[in-house]
Image (spheres, rainbow, N blue to C red):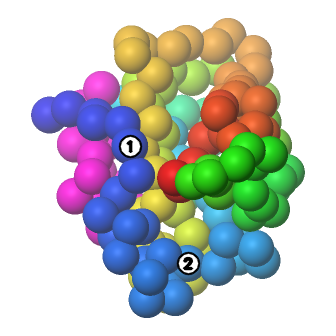
Amino acid sequence: MAIAQGATNTFKVGLLDGTFDLAAGSFKIALYTGAASIGPDTTAYTTDGEVVASGYTAGGNALTISQVPTIGNQSGNATAYLSFSNVTWTSALTARGALIYQVGSGNPAACVLDFGADKTSTTTFTVQFPAATNTAAIIRIS
């Protein structure tokens, strides 16, 4: 079992076939333990290996798009990007990774995050997204 970070194959194809609405779609982030097996081949939200803890609801929390899809300020082959606001759970829990997915129509998987090691909180667990720029945003296409 392992967590492999990156965009899912479902997301890559879904960008081209219209499955994903990055400007107005609803997204969630679910947390996973080290027992989860999620990565590029993950097609949709799954409960296998999802965190079970008091104060954590299966399916995770809603994400707010903080930066709608836009183009970075660069010449030539520009990078398109979007980002989300940080998300928190007010409970004690341990997670090794996360899955970002679009809500509805089968809950297609967009992106897997690997925290690199178990992360534990005693009061508030926060997933902090990188700066919303063309060189750092959580989702970038160049």
The answer to which image quadrant residue 138 occupies is: top right
Structural distance between the alpha carbons of marks 1 and 2: 16 Å
Find residue 125 and report its horizontal and vertical position in percent. 69, 23
Task: Please name the predominant secondary structure of the magenta segment in the image.
Answer: loop
Going by the numbered disc 1, the residue's amino acid type is Gly
Image quarter in which the N terminus is found: top left
Find residue 36 and report its horizontal and vertical position in percent. 27, 39
Magenta stretch? Answer: 34-49
Q: Judging from the image, what secondary structure is the residue with disc 2 in? A: loop
Residue 133 horizontal side relative to residue 30, left or right: right
Label 2, on which residue?
20
Residue 99 horizontal side relative to residue 121, left or right: left
Q: Is residue 136 above or below residue 23?
A: above
Label 1, on which residue?
6
Residue at the image position 43 percent from the left and 89 percent from the top: 17
Q: Is residue 69 above or below residue 122?
A: below
Is residue 88 visible to the viewer in this orientation of the structure? Answer: no
